[in-house]
Amino acid sequence: MPELPEVETVRCGILPHCYQKLITDVKIYQHQLRWPIPVTLPKILVGQCILGVERRGKYILLQLERGTLLWHLGMSGVLRVFEQALPSQKHDHVDIFFGETLLRYRDVRRFGALLWHEGPDVSAHPLLASLGPEPLSEAFSSDYLYAILRSRQAPIKTILMNANIVVGVGNIYANEALFAAKVHPLKSGNKLTRAETIEVVRQVKAILTQAIILGGTTLKDFQNIQGKPGYFRQALFVYGRKNQPCLLCQEILLEVRLQGRSTVFCPHCQKA
DNA sequence: AAATCTCCCTGTAGGC
DNA sequence: TGCCTACAGGGAGATT
């Protein structure tokens, strides 16, 4: 399940294969993703050169000559590069060819999306326009978050996962960052002290940075473009460890559901 | 305005 | 062994 570190790993992986390459063919095997892929997309893309491979939150942005491709990997999306054409298999949905080289999108659960934005200024796209700052940028500061928390009584974990407040923090890293910051995930945003806010911001940045270095977290679905797993999984303290002892204090970790998401915490280390 | 709920999808795991 | 159900989750959009 790609979160920001996984998406960044994929972006860096495809970059050398895509950058300044000419799109020679596009094959779509399955149009029905989160939003339907327009049937005209191949016609739009073929003949354009890739001028940039960027990322905004969990969107990979392929900047072409006449606009931008927005690519979201959803839960189970995988982008891989092959040096020659090969038959598509079940759950392979899109192939983009650069001559012999092939960029293939596979997505078992089809929560991903592939959208075309005509013209410059992709940041004006409705899906990007209201996104919060990048978590690893200076804009995501404790001052910024603390100001937002004044008017929020939702659980801090829900707030961290709100892309309009900060992008790229999904369920795994929200759980892990709050454990590392020793803040209870159910604590109301406006109840966090300034010191707690500073620590939450610090830990979000630290954990995302470490995960990027390790190539992302592999649970079931994530692979980098070579098809290799990430190595962050062994660094997980709470995610997926319900009813197991806390690695710091041996207390049994508890789970609650928040917005339908599994939320695991240590009742001893993370005080409400 | 903010918070919560619903839905999209399919492979996997657990119960019987 | 095989069938059935619950569950996993990003996030937009609807609803409260």
Image (spheres, coloured by chain):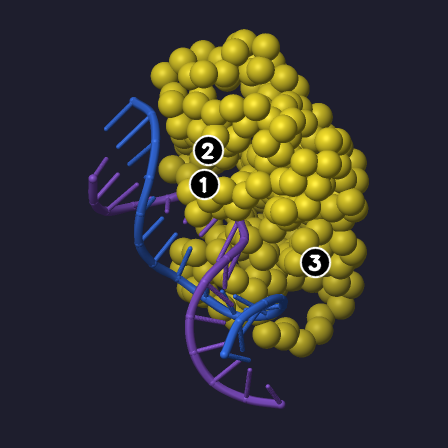
Chain colours: A yellow, B blue, C purple
Q: Is residue A207 left or right of residue A42?
A: right
Q: Is residue A239 left or right of residue A215?
A: left
Q: Nearer the viewer, residue A109 or A32?
A: A109
Residue A40 lies, with reference to residue A59, above or below; the image says below
Report how far apart the C-alphas of labels 3 and 2 lie in the structure.
32 Å
| Residue corresponding to mark 2 | A158
- Residue A255, given in percent of the width and then of the height, sits at 54, 43
Q: Nearer the viewer, residue A192 or B2?
A: A192
Residue contact between numbered discs 1 and 2, judged by CB atoms under 8 Å: yes
What chain does mark 2 sit on? A
- Residue A113, given in percent of the width and then of the height, sits at 48, 53
Tags 3 and 2 on a common chain:
yes
Q: Nearer the viewer, residue A71 or A4?
A: A4
Where disc 1 sits, the SS reads strand
Which numbered tag is attached to residue A258? 1
Residue at coordinates 53% horizontally, 46% vertically from top-left?
Answer: A262
Quadrant of res A106 = bottom right
Mark nearer the viewer, 1 or 2? 1
Report how far apart the C-alphas of labels 1 and 2 lie in the structure.
7 Å
Where disc 2 sits, the SS reads helix
Residue A160 visible in the shown view: no
| Residue corresponding to mark 3 | A80
Question: Please, what is the three-letter code of the amino acid marked with disc 2?
Answer: Thr
